Amino acid sequence: MAINATIVIGLNLLIGFAGQISLGHAGFVGMGAFASAILPYHFGWSPFAAMIAGALATGLLAGLVARPIFKLKGHYLAMATLGLGIIINIVLRNESQYTGGPDGMPVMPMEIFNFEISGDQHWYWIVAMLLCISIWASLNLINSPFGRALRALHGSEVAASVAGVNVERYKIVIFIVSALFASIMGSITAHYIGFITPNVADFPHSIELLTMVVVGGVASIYGSVIGAVLLTALPQALASFEGWETVVYGVILVGCMIFVPRGLVPTLAARFRKEG
């Protein structure tokens, strides 16, 4: 839940505050995960250095593709980000000599200053700390001049440009920031599980992340957390339906889209303010 929540916070900064869609965000998760798997396993890197290198490579790729991608609008932008995610997934599946192909590969334990992180309790505190830092940093970001520029960009790119906002620069920066969130948590996921497959970078995973944003609340940091918690736990809670869990899952999601289209947290917050 905490891993997904951190990824979704970064994605919500891109979608909810900057107004830019991404249908291939799981590709960045996969890049971080496989960097943490490949570099230590094949090249002898330390796991921590591999995680940092994976984040830097992901940020570099995001920066390189952001400029041409964000010249597009609407459905064309969505298709471009979808294509990027699919390309990353195909590369991870086809480069079997490094990634293990569709079967995946083992991941070495995380070590920081010769201290090996293992066990649920260690990972719980690390991931909880990263989630809290992400929430704090994101709340400060959206209340800063940078965040106000993002909201202006979301409202109207033309108006934001007239007001002096460098639209292209802000789009690129927030795309890189969002990709870094995904890459780092992808690395954490790989080390926590101890095994990784290209499924972590596939299209259904991207849609799951996007759905968490929408259900919890677009342009809501706490909504990102709530959406990730609910949709991570929901498939497990529905396991007792034995074959019907996907149908029930879909019905719940459709109901959320109909009755709380703004997302759970913004809708409930607005209702409480109205009653107060």
Image: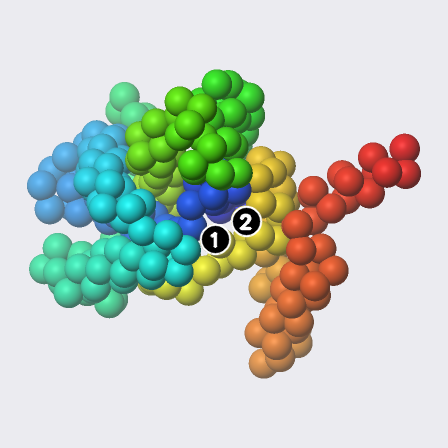
Work out whether 176 lies above or below 260.
above
Name the side, left or right, on which 271 lies relative to 190.
right
The secondary structure type at the circle numbered 1 is helix
Is residue 139 placed above or below 220 in the rendered structure?
A: above
Q: How crowded is mark 2: few (under 14 residues within 10 Å), some or many (20 or more)?
A: many
| Residue 246 drawn at (x, y percent) | 57, 74
Under mark 2, the amino acid is Val
Q: Residue at x 90, y 38 (%)?
A: 275
Q: Residue 209 carries which label?
A: 1
Q: Is mark 2 on a helix, strand or loop?
A: helix
Discs 2, 1 touching: Cβ within 8 Å:
yes
Furthest residue in direction bottom, as rendered:
243
**Residue 150 pos. (x, y %):** 46, 31
Residue at the (82%, 43%) spot, across then down: 271
Which numbered disc covers residue 213? 2
In terms of image quadrants, where is residue 255? bottom right
* x and y, in percent, of residue 52 in the image: 25, 31
Q: Quadrant of the C terminus?
A: top right
Q: x%, y% of residue 227?
A: 60, 49
